[in-house]
Amino acid sequence: MLGKNSIEGNSNVLVGGDLILRLPPNQQVNVLKRLFEAADERFKSEISETGKVFRISREIDFSAEKLFTSLMQLGIPLDVALRIPSDIIDFLREVLDERQPLSGEEPVSTADIRIAVVRSIEALPSTDGFSAETSSMWAAAYIRRYGNPENDFVKVLDHGAEIDLDYDYLSTVILPHILARVLGLPRESAPERLFSQIFNKTRIGEMSTEIMRAVNTLNLYTISYKTLLFLVQDLVVEPPHPWLVNGQTRQKVVEYNIERMMSHYAKLSSKGERKTLALLHHAYQEFFRHSGAAILALYGAFLGVGSRYGLAELIRVLGMQRKNLALWSFCEIHCIEDDLIVTGTRRQSLSGEAQRAMSKLSHPARDGKHLVELESTVEYFLRTTMALRDLRSDSRDA
């Protein structure tokens, strides 16, 4: 795949923990200026040729320096704050891909930028070794400060009372109610207890962050409970990146993710087309994300949220085996081990290939060697995903 493509130069700027500014102040300024200019140029070359973004109804310049400053004000470490203005490009492309089917070709907005920043922060545990709790805390702080700057929390109109739409309200009221609706559970079944058993604090934090992000981009001051419930339900069950499936949505979600997986596979396999290394890396990421999501959807499992959608969640679930009995009781993921054997592989093999893909994509080589090394893993995932889809389809038809 990669070997069949002509790769143009990679303009990524890599800034990590190995960057130490031990220079005189005037030289530090020059180094920072070059980094910001490189991030701005990458934005122009890969996202918007004009370098403009829309804020409400007017155009403003994308500024890596301003984004860096906003991150530093939140207490995010220097090396991470320096990298994010460039790192968000991949996440921003993902955000734009998600909304294209819904809104067509539209200019990049500051809301898109904010979403990409949050996803970049949330991805830090898998790429930089930060704890999930730390990255979730930074993401929440960013949303609170920049999601809706004139109001700390949207107010939910709930039975005549105005309640802050905060993490406690989302995790104890909204999300358990959604779980009950999606899975068809009666309210007397205490869905909040099942919810807390299935999802740990990190996953609950990720879901809450994504809901806060979605609501804040609407620039609302109040929202009715019923409207919020329907909004969150659509976020949870509808493509492009649903978190849960049920009997009515499972097939649609499986087929959607397989269609996206095949679309990105075609990009990897096409001959003669010139691609930048950044575009190829993105295609590999999306291939594995949607393949992982399709496999999880086949068994009615949780698909993941944000940057942990698909592949990262598949790794987590496969590593659990049967440790989370509540998860095993509400979906059919316990069947995957026997199904994999029928298709000619094993759970350990799928888990190992998934972890290999995650590792290679999280620590990319500048020359693209990591993509060449993933070619066999791509073929394994394609073969396994399609075999499981056919097997599960046959079992339902029997």
Image (cartoon, helix red, strand yellow):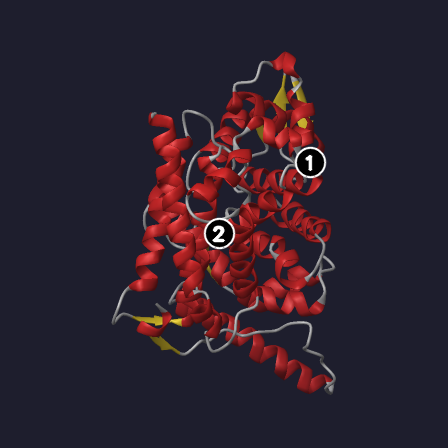
Instruction: Look at 54% across and 27% down and name the residue there.
Output: 228
- Give the secondary structure at mark 1: helix
Q: Is residue 5 visible?
A: no
- Looking at the picture, which amino acid does disc 2 mark? Asp
User: Is 80 in front, or is 312?
Assistant: 312
Mark 2: give few (<14), some (14-19) or many (20+) Cα within 10 Å.
many
Instruction: Look at 64% across and 15% down and name the residue there.
Output: 189
- Label drawn at residue 167: 1
Image height check: is 280 above or below 125? below
Q: Position of residue 356 (x, y in %)?
A: 54, 61
User: Is 221 in front, or is 166?
Assistant: 166
Q: Is residue 396 visible?
A: yes
**Which residue is disc 2 drawn over?**
112
Instruction: Look at 52% across and 23% down and name the residue there.
Output: 183
In three-dimensional space, the C-alpha distance between marks 1 and 2, rounded to whole angstroms, equals 22 Å
Of callouts 1 and 2, the N-terminal one: 2
Residue that extends furthest to the left in the rendered view of this protein: 272
Q: Position of residue 380 (x, y in %)?
A: 42, 56
Residue 78 occupies quadrant: bottom right
Circles 1 and 2 in contact, beta carbons < 8 Å? no
Q: Position of residue 282 (x, y in %)?
A: 43, 61
Q: How many marks?
A: 2
**Which circle, 1 or 2, is nearer the viewer?**
1
- Label drawn at residue 73: none
Report the side of 137 relative to 54 (left or right). Answer: right
Q: Position of residue 218 (x, y in %)?
A: 51, 38
- Give the secondary structure at mark 2: helix
Residue 205 occupies quadrant: top right
* Quarter occupied by the N terminus: bottom left
Image height check: is 95 above or below 368? above
